[in-house]
Image: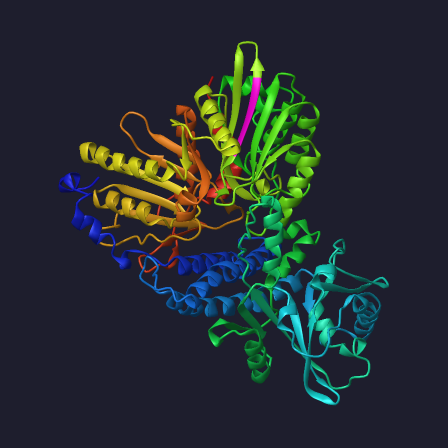
Amino acid sequence: MLAPNNLDFDTNNASTQKKLDNPSYFLNRELSWIRFNGRVLEEARDLWHPLLERVKFIAICGSNLDEFFMTRVARLIKKVKAGSEEKAMDGMSFIEQIDATRKEIIPLIENHAKCWRDELVPALAKEEIYVRSFNDLSEKDKESLREFLKTEIVPSIRVPKVGFDSVSIENLHVTLYISGFQNQPSFCILLDVPTEKFGRLINTPKKGHVETNKDTESKEYHFVLLEDLIINNLDTIFPTEKNLTAYPFRLTRNGEIDILMDESADFLKSVQKSLSTRKVGFPTRLEFDKKMPNFIRQTIAKKVGLPDYLTYEFDGPLGLVDLWQLLKINRQDLKDKSFFPCISPLLVSENNIFETIARQDFVLYHPYDGFEVIIDLLKESGLDSYVSEICITMYRMDHKSPVVDALIEAARNGKKVTAIVELKAKFDEENNILLVTKLRSGGVNTVYNFPNFKVHAKLCLITRKEKNGVVRYSHIGSGNYNAVTAKIYGDIGYLTANPEVGLELEGLFDAIINGLQEKETKHLLVAPKTLKSEILRRIDREISFHQKTGRGYLAFKLNNLEEKEIIQALYKASMAGIKIDLNVRGLCCLRPGIKGVSDNISVISIVGRFLEHARIYYFSDDTEDEVLIGSSDMMFRNLNERIEVLLSVPDPYLRQAILENMLKIHLRDNVKARRLLPDGTYERVVVKEGEEVINSQAWLIQNRGIWNERAH
């Protein structure tokens, strides 16, 4: 509790607002994201994780860096080229941000390479998983691999014409710069390494054959990198050449696509047409092998038009994202211990799931709770004679989705099924175009024509005509209806037959599908119309509550915190004396610990076995605390450019269960949590003397399902 003089603090006067516009009060978005990736890399170095899970984090770190250059750096480059004089919240210009990110990325990729080379490669070798240089193999193994290269790989290699064709360089592919041709000393060839077909890692001979990325049943593995195999056997491709040299490099291109709208064309076709631009997007990064001579680096950089500050040297294999391949190895002893997700006895398929949900609400916290509940609900909906209609949103779906199968089966059984598919889900556009085709052919009405915003909300509504009238069964959550990610993402979902929630959700679906005006809602906070203003109103309400009682408290769990007005509102709450606990997994532009501004705000980030993806917002109140759950982070894009939904949890028991058994458990994490410091860096949370050791994800596994265990 704060001193009494803070209770009368005026948070809305002009001088306070001016003070809160100070650029030094904000952390840079791009730098915050890079530091998040640093925390991912820390997990690869953490011996608490099984070995192959550490390899997974190395791959995730590489994947995240790739996406950063394809999206964030691409945007910065566009702004610089356009001569924009805009500045970030922290006052940095776009070129300053490129420079600042480079200074943080260089040590990050050095540690990335070092972790792989000095920690994981030796650790894998101790487990008889060897990643070797071709030259370190026995002569017998070399010869067997050469034969495999000649007979299987070389016929698949498309040898281009001599010369440097920058347009042909594939995004994120390992490419070989080959030179030293007879009678053409100044010429080169760019050779694309065919990893898509053969994998990046080739397993050396065993029992007379060579194993590729599909072979994962051995107990002992001897891998070589495909580019290393090619580089050391160039004569199999160029048999008349004797003095060739080859060096790998990797080009990253802009991954943002501009939808080329044609009023006469279907939006799906517009997205499909626009995707082709990604393959030839402008370059945003060059990665070189450390051994590559400087004059070759300069030649490549000049040809693709990249300055030195967008080129990076790597001491080890390029593109460590490809190490995902090692996760296919059948060594369960080197992976996370599996567990059976909880399914409440009330929600098992043997019971009538509609009658169960009609009696009480349920909260599902995946992967601790089984996603099978949702799949079974949709399957039952397709078979139930009382169900008349199903509406659902789709953002990122798994390839062999049981949800999609259930929807198609429901449509075949005469139900009216509508799927709202977001075609612009980044890097999933092609998958979603195929998804629309599959749904359409299965009789599902698909809606996707949203050129100006993204439908990011995670919603499902099942309408059932029962004896006493129409009952609407609602599911609102933070996670995609994806059976694969439901096992590895921490996501929250809410099941209810609350009639007010059902009517509000029905009205929202009508508004999205038919372009109708949104109605006022009591339980749903919907972006871009009301969500931001409602969050700000609740923070103001908390300040008023605290000024009257001294008992104000806010606790948020989210992926990213970047929206300026939300941050300023949290500053005002802190200045009024309210204690604020934030669990922000990824980027956070709020700077904690500013004296007199944010010294009542604590920010932690948790990176662990599961990707923290749930959004939970808690507001203390004298009469009835409020908990919001749903899809929205506090970012400009979520609040202004997307359809997002947060649900104000209507059930008092589940509000308390979410607070005590989910949110507070994460906030008490002192194993996987890192605390954000005022300078924007993070430090591990240290267990205090006498304090219980809590790894929140491990606690949730051990206590899974406890949130639905009501006393009857």
Image coordinates of residue 293 in percent, x first then y, are 59, 83
Q: Is residue 596 visible?
A: no
User: Is 332 located above or below residue 437 in the figure?
Assistant: below
Determine which quarter of the picture holds residue 382: top right
Front residue of 6 and 692: 6
Q: Is residue 66 visible?
A: yes
Q: Is residue 607 one of those drawn in magenta? A: no
Examine the residues drawn in magenta and state their main secondary structure. Answer: strand
Image coordinates of residue 708 in percent, x first then y, are 49, 27
| Residue 74 appears left or right of 193 | left
Q: Residue furthest bottom?
A: 183
Residue at x 25%, y 42% (from the top left corner): 573
Image coordinates of residue 147 in percent, x first then y, are 84, 70
User: Is 504 located above or below residue 677 in the figure?
Assistant: above
Image coordinates of residue 263 in percent, x first then y, are 55, 46
Q: Which region of the structure is painted magenta?
A: 459-464
Residue at x 67%, y 27% (from the top left corner): 411
Front residue of 155 and 41: 155
| Residue 546 appears left or right of 651 | left
Determine which quarter of the picture holds residue 348: top right
Front residue of 205 and 28: 28
